Image (cartoon, coloured by chain):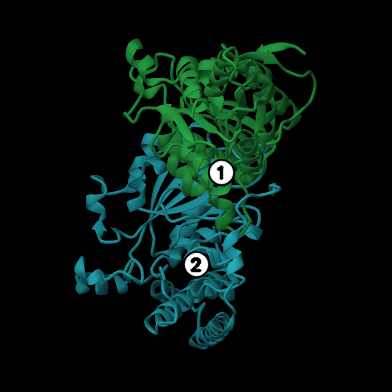
Amino acid sequence: MELSKDTLLAMYYAMLRSRRLDERAWVLHRQGKIVFHISAMGHEASQVGAAFALKPGKDWLVPYYRDLALMLCFGLTSREFMLSLFGKQGEVSSGARQMPSHFGLRRANVVSTSAPVATQIPHAAGIGLGIKMRGDDAVAVTCIGEGSTSQGEWYEGLNWAAVHKLPVICIVQNNQYAISVPARLQMAIPDVADRAAAFGMPGVVVDGNDVLACHKAMVDAVSRARSGGGPTLIESKTYRPVPHSSDDDDRSYRSREEVAEWKKRDPILLFKTSLEGQGVLTSALNDEYETKITAEVDDAHKFAEAAPYPPVECALGPVYATEAYHA
Amino acid sequence: MPEMTLIEAIRQAMDEELARDECVFITGEDVGPRGGVFRATLGLFDKYGPNRIIDSPLAELSIVGVGIGAAVYGMRPICEIQFADFIFPAFNQILNEAARMYYRSGGDWAVPMVIRAPYGGGIGGGLYHSQSVEAFFAHIPGLKVVIPSNPKDAKGLLKSAVRDPNPVIFLEPKKGYRLIKGDVPEGEYTIPIGPANVSREGADLTVFAYGMMHYYCLQAAEAVAKEGINVEVVDLRTLMPVDKTTILASVKKTGKALIVHEDNLTGGYGGEIAAIISDEAFTDLDAPVKRLCSPDVPGVPFSHPMQDWFMPNPEKIAKAIRELAAY
């Protein structure tokens, strides 16, 4: 499928925007202005490639904590993300009850997520079951790291999706480390995608630093899901060029040389080079993007820093619903 | 009013709710053509078909996790855990996901679902088909915990649970499935989740119980009535949220409280009732608050004499009533 020049540039812009927002979060943490950040750096191609194959507002997403770029594509604003970093009033996923990046966005069908890993996978299967029962034209997408595929929740959720041929897509963003533990200590196989065969669903390995490859794999999976062909497991092989979170120090478990080598394959750098080579992206246009994004990040940062904290009464509830929202 | 057994009332409640709302569906192990190992769903597969009465894989956490996903999508799942003893693989989903979803999303995502589970001993089930699990769940804000003791309540409470926008743990005293019979009103009715029921009026002391133990407490109360001890019996029915008003009013009236449950003593739900009474009805008391519970051993033994030693029964309850009455 040939993507238009505008689409290619929109993808690039989405990746760049996520990266610059992410970088600001690290700066704010090092300045002592926020207490925690967990980064999407290096994962932008996996997420933006996937997002551009979906219909935000129609499709359903059950993300994980590293999905900043995906969330931005689903309509999370920079201001909203910054409110979550600062724990300020109006934070959209949880009213600042949760730590940053525990995403959820009701208006965009992004289900609230927690911190115990892999719990979201059965939820995606359940959403897929609901879609199938109602005959709706939507897909349920969920993301997870490779380490979390060691959890029983992952197996049980994907097994349901396969048994009932549900419109579910699981994207495993394999960045090769679960905090400090390398993938070779998570599993005895080189590719998580091989496990798809055990469920009875297609498993696809894709270069997670190549946004167009990620996009292509997702387009195929979405097409399969929408046509009743059932679930797909996509393994997006990538790398996390920063520590697991702002509380981690990755110097204790991997060499600087290894990190430097992967930074040469940074997904934004690769895509930028490619677009420049095709004459799609010019230096002037890139500067324009950077200026625009910097202004947006500055604005979001200032907005959130100046925002009030939620009143403590907000901690009281809501504990019980009096009515349920329906899809 | 027709007389029916506890399990017939439960089945009728589900049948009526399935007919009333097409969002309602049932999943769990063997709930399909087999009709459940206790036959709670007998006939429902033939009536509603495989899309609404879904035999799940043999994996409890996903029965609940998939139910959560379907619930946030807008369905109304009734998830059956075959025995309460097997609910613990799903504990993470219940505690960290179902119970916390509404609060953690600031009220954006409600989880309207029922988790039914047969519980309790005295049926030759040994350690792993006899457990009482209510204390674990009654500790969790965001959950509702309901335990019916008779057919009329079971039907009315289960219908309320299906319509409730929150996750409801519905624990059924399986020893009473066919043993406990009672009149059930004809036609549509519900019984609200929350209020306890004064099932026997008395003046000398109050016995607080639920489920199978409530059935035994009524028998014990009849036995001691012949000796001139006038016992009030309160069927708690809902453990979370607890009905303090009814509890305190009864203690104010009788001045003495005995709490009976078949879960073991330490950390059991009776401790909460005792705490409420000592905290808010201290000056009404004429005697220490007493608890009759099973012993602090790791489970219900299989062999009959040992099982009988473990389980509270009408004779043991009558003895505890006499001792408290004599205080």
Say which residue label 2 marks.
Answer: A69
The image position of residue A110, as x and y in percent, is 58, 56
Nearer to the camera, A87 or A178: A87
Say which residue label 1 marks.
Answer: B143
Three-letter code for the amino acid on which mark 2 is drawn: Ala
Tell me which chain the residue with mark 1 is part of: B
- Which chain does the green colour mark? B
Which residue of the protein is positioned furthest toward the right in this rendering?
Answer: B187
Nearer to the camera, A305 or B171: B171
Question: Marks 2 and 1, how far apart in space?
Answer: 34 Å
Nearer to us: label 2 or label 1: 1
Left or right relative to A266: residue B276:
right
- At x 65% / y 35%, what residue is drawn? B253
The image position of residue B261, as x and y in percent, is 48, 28
Tell me which chain the residue with mark 2 is part of: A
Three-letter code for the amino acid on which mark 1 is drawn: Leu
